[in-house]
Image (spheres, rainbow, N blue to C red):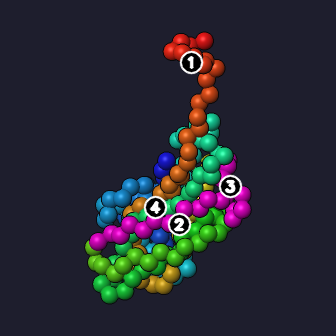
Amino acid sequence: MILLPDGASGHTWHWAANTGTHEDCLDDDNGDTSYVACSAANRQLNLTYANPSVAEGDIDFSVAPSVRFLSSGRSTHRTTDSEVDISFLTPTAGFSETVSYDKHASSYETINGTPRLTSDGSATWTYSDLENLSMKCTKNGSIQVRLSYLALEVTYTEAVAVTDNATFFGANF
């Protein structure tokens, strides 16, 4: 399932939305139609995410789910890449990855994060964890970056429905 941003905080004046809200700019991969841009080093954009669209009982937590970010962005510079550190804020801060968007004046690049099998480095994900996800983007350097998409992908195993009826020799009992 894909979780989309539903709120933003932090240095939002340095992470300028070209239209609408920050979370609206990051909920689809539409290039320069809507994006957030930043060129100020060490400025943070904190994003909260919508709750899962799958009910807790429909996820088999005995098989560890994984969570990773999906992003689309670009450096606006013709000769220099633009970097952003993307990390979890909740349920446990950390798991930071430096994303380097290639130098190009107009093309967006898709970069996806490493699938995380644990919420804190040792404990597997719980439904409560999935209901409380937030991410932090921290700009590296002063080369402008434009982000058009920053979603979370949750990969899980569907729970098997248990039925009381048994089939024997072609008949239900």
Q: CA distance from mark 2 to mark 4?
A: 10 Å
Distance between mark 2 and mark 3 Cα atoms: 15 Å
Horizontally, residue 76 falls left or right of residue 7, namely: left
Q: Is residue 114 left or right of residue 33?
A: right
Q: Dot 2 corresponds to which residue? A: 114
Query: For the residue marked with disc 3, what is the amino acid?
Result: Thr
Looking at the image, is mark 1 or mark 2 nearer the viewer?
A: 1
- Give residue 53's position: percent from left, percent from top: 52, 41
Q: Position of residue 152 (x, y in %)?
A: 51, 56
Find residue 124 and name its label: 3
**Quadrant assignment for the C terminus:** top right
**Of pointers 3 and 4, the one earlier in the residue sequence:** 4
Give SS at disc 2: loop
Task: From the image, state whether disc 1 or disc 3 is nearer to you.
Answer: 1
Is disc 1 placed on a helix, strand or loop? strand
The image quarter in which residue 11 lies = bottom right
Depicted 90 relative to depicted 155: above or below: below
**From which residue to which does the magenta span run?**
107-128
- How far apart are the alpha carbons under marks 1 and 3? 36 Å
In this rendering, the answer to whether 155 lies above or below 114 is above
Q: Which mark is residue 70?
A: 4
Image height of 160 relative to 70, above or below: above
Amino acid at the residue labelled 2: Thr
* Residue 122 is at least partly visible in this image: yes
Q: Please, what is the three-letter code of the amino acid marked with disc 4?
A: Leu
Q: Marks 3 and 4, how far apart in space?
A: 20 Å
Which element type, helix, strand or loop, lies under badge 4? Answer: strand
| Residue at horizontal 67 percent and vertical 49 percent from the top | 126
**Pointer 3 with pointer 4, Cβ within 8 A:** no
Residue 111 found in image quarter: bottom left
Viewer-closest of 139 and 3: 3
Residue 6 in view here: no
